[in-house]
Amino acid sequence: MNTTTQAAMDAVEPLSFDEALEAFEPVMGFEVHVELNTATKMFSSAPNAFGDEPNTNVNEVDLGMPGTLPAVNGKAVESAIKLGLALNCSIAEHCRFARKQYFYPDTPKNWQTSQYDEPIAFDGHLDVELDDGEIFRVDIERAHMEEDAGKLTHAGTSGRIQGADYSLVDYNRAGVPLIEIVTKPITGAGKRAPEIARAYVSAIRDIVKGLDISDARMERGNVRCDANVSLMRRGAEVFGTRSETKNVNSMRAVEHAVTYEIRRHAGILSAGGSIVQETRHWKEDTRTTSSGRPKSDADDYRYFPEPDLVPIVTTTEWVEALRAELPEPPAQRRRRLREAWGYSEAEFRDVIAAGLLDEIEETVGQGASPAVARKWWMGEISRLANARGVDPAALGVEPVTIVELNRLIEGGTVNDKIARQVLEHHVDGEGAPADIVRNRGLEVVSDDGALTAAVEKAMAENPDVVEKVKGGKLKAIGALIGPVMKETRGQADAGKVKEIVLQTLGMDS
Amino acid sequence: MTHTTDALVRLTAAEMAAKLRAGDITSVELTQAHLDRIAAVDDTINAFLHVAADEALETAAAVDTTRAAGGAAAESLHPLAGVPIAIKDLIVTKGQPTTAGSKMLQGWMSPYDATVVEKVRAARMPILGKTNLDEFAMGSSTEHSAYGPTRNPWDITRIPGGSGGGSAAAVAAFEAPLALGTDTGGSIRQPGAVTGTVGTKPTYGGVSRYGAIAMASSLDQIGPVARTVEDAALLHEVIAGHDKKDSTSLPETEYPEGEVPAFSAAASTKTAKGLRIGVIKQLQGEGYQSGVLARFHEALDQLQGAGAEIVEVDCPSFDYALGAYYLIMPSEASSNLARYDGVRYGTRVLPEEGPLTIERVMGSTRAAGFGEEVKRRIILGTYALSAGYYDAYYGSAQKIRTLIQQDFAAAFEQADVLISPTSPTVAFPLGEKLDDPLAMYLNDVATIPANLAGIPGISVPGGLSDGLPVGIQFLAPAKQDARVYHAAGALEQLLNDTYDAPLWAQIPALEEVAR
């Protein structure tokens, strides 16, 4: 297709999602790249670390220096096997790496060492839980190991290599171990296609996090998704031409990208046009995609088996030992915890969304009740974290601290309000809660002498309130609590204040 | 006691080592003698691309100090400590340039040492410098070097073989007692044959390839170059062994003895008695010069006379070895050489006109940086790996490789070692085959099968034809490198007895040629 037609196709107005689904059935496919959290790179002993000075985490292997050879990171292979098992895949008894050859400056050898026709894991499936609890099965074609490329930064207005004034390359990422998970074509999703897309990527993220094989931080590119979408007319049997939207790197973006591509394809097909097989760029700001480069199945990467590496042989004993190490599948774990904690569906969803499942589980494990654990993590800790612009889990609050704080409340040493202050001081580095309370003199004022004096003073200053209480309006006592708190710098126990007022008035029984 | 330079450099490495141990000579004297020799003859021979006089003398002086101090440190010196060595410029060295004989790497300094260089340094052998080669080891004459051809010390109008002509010529011209080479299709053995020296291609995986600039990964192997079989064995012992940086290197446990065998002990056996030697039917006759065949048959007679059993073995797939090699080697080379693009290191050539896009800079760099033979092989290999051709070319070649391995396996049922001429011809005149790639490729017809099968091979001098050396090749099963030293040591002894001196004693005095 020439560029004029391409431009014309791009100008076609997308159909609405509902209109699109009336006429067409979407078919999806995903390639998710997971960066592993191994200490070193896939084929070299250089550190695998994010965010360091450019070109510092590199050695001669990563830079493709003459004479260098790769050596496989055994830990990365174990991660791949674990992930394969978690995706219900078969594990190859014998598999090899291949060279995928293309010239590009982010690839130091001008080939990527990857697995081609011999992936380490294949033929699996993943049961994905949708928002309403329905389970949708996604079939997995394969999961294979490969190395990441370096990172290019293009200086100039376009931000792309074409038309850049110059480009900078950082090879810190070159050679970082990746596992690419490829689905089989996903059919029968219908209207729920975008939701399934999001749930699938979310499930992959949960699994790799649960396996502790990746930091799984999408904003850092630890989990990256390429979304393939095609449409076929309802009743048709042959898949339509697909587009591949690259680097859709958040769960919400995956959902939006699939939605947009379904609408875009439907618009073009309904107008009598045809879809160009191409890669598309995801544009977060407009929630649309734009044309990338044409991609044909005939792209010739001149694959051949990597002669510098010996085949990987996986023994049954090895695979079974790794299987025994697998944690409980995330979906199963979530179901178990929700039932055990008695949270409502909404409460539990909020906990998941906040990424605090592990923290709450550990806090409960340390002896807090599920309600107390949730109150602290979803309440004050989240508020503090939000105010400071960090993740609640990254605030540095240990589950045991929550248990200690709660013990101080339950023992009457502090009230809720003071406990929240103590937490803030703790986050600011003032030490353990009990120490903060002692050092700052924050114990609840419970000796009756001081408190009684404060109450009597408040009553003397508010005779009208006292009259109301005498008249039986016990709720009016609330108006005395403020002044008492002021007098005691907030360290009074409200229940105790009420008790003393009634005692003083001879109304206790 | 004083020694003339000439007397010192004509010792074998084993003799030099003995004299160093005995305190008869110092390593500084010995190293300086070789540096003097290089200064005297290398303008003529052009074996060295880089001479590291200061570094070599520094290493030598340190060895001398250690030895003079005596005690445990002196006792624990490696047997070859203080014996100088030259390194093929395909093997990377920290602190000395590595060019691979190409303009592409002109001025490039490796940030790391090859594993074999680490081992040579650990043995405290002074490194004299880096030797010439066909660009990226692609050639059989060293004429494809971007830095001019090396000349054969036997006749400076002739080629020294290739690709490791520099290492072989340096050793033949007494510029170095020992050298390291690399052998992908015969680049150690064929130069050995045409310069009257000894060269071994070890079992694939027997020596780490880490730091050997790759031509064809599944065929390349680093090996020793020397004037005697024993010297080659001694150097082989220095460099052998597993390296975790080279996944294809053999763990010691793979050897029958559970460790790298003592090659020098095998070399010292010096008897052919009881050895079953298989003559490969396919590697003789048509295409082999009559003078080469004459020396070959004499060698067979002598071995038989010394008690060896000579049998003929049939290796029918060898007829396809050259064809398979010239698909596998360029395929892997086209990939291995993709990294030379001017982006990260080495030569960068900007296009003379037009926009400076990455593709165009890569293109002009590769156009200017690579020589004709390299380009020929890159194009051939790129084609052979292309979609739609892969099965017919690369895939078929791999099948032939399997058939060749089967032929060898069958042959080794009948014989302990196999024998053939190393090269079909003696050294040919410079320029003779430069414009005829196919004729050039035929030089390696007898050496290539060993690379395709991953087995060890050695070339040992077998006498002269019209005043030029003829090489005899022995091959053994994988991991049985000791056998090639055993057989070659026996033949070397027989020929020394016949000629009453090593063949290399007849190499012309080059100083006179130079003057």
Image: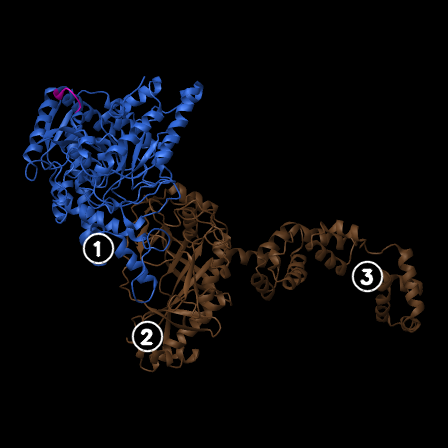
Badge 1 element: helix
- Disc ID at residue A185: none
Badge 2 element: loop
Majority secondary structure in the magenta region: loop
CA distance separating discs 3 and 2: 69 Å
From the viewer's side, name the closer residue of B234 and A125.
B234
CA distance separating discs 2 and 1: 36 Å
- Magenta stretch in the rendered image: B498-502
The amino acid sitting under disc 3 is: Gly
Tell me: A392 left or right of A443.
Answer: left
Image coordinates of residue B421 in percent, x first then y, are 12, 33
Chain drawn brown in the picture: A
Image coordinates of residue B182 in percent, x first then y, are 26, 38
Q: Does the magenta stretch include residue B135?
A: no
Q: Does the magenta stretch include residue B499?
A: yes
The amino acid sitting under disc 2 is: Ile
**What is the crowding at mark 3: few (fewer than 14 residues within 10 Å), some, or many (at least 20)?**
many
Residue bearing the label numbered 3: A490
Please tell me whether residue B140 is drawn above or below residue B231 in the rendered image: below
Chain drawn blue in the picture: B
State which quadrant residue A302 falls in: bottom left
From the viewer's side, name the closer residue of A133 and B476.
B476
Chain of the residue on which disc 2 is drawn: A
* Residue at 36% from the left image edge and 37% from the top image edge: B115
Residue bearing the label numbered 1: B379
Are dots 2 and 1 on a single chain? no
What coloring was used for the rendering? by chain
Residue bearing the label numbered 2: A275
State which quadrant residue B162 falls in: top left
Image coordinates of residue A337 in percent, x first then y, are 57, 56
Residue B258 in view, yes or no = no
Tell me: A457 left or right of A436.
Answer: right
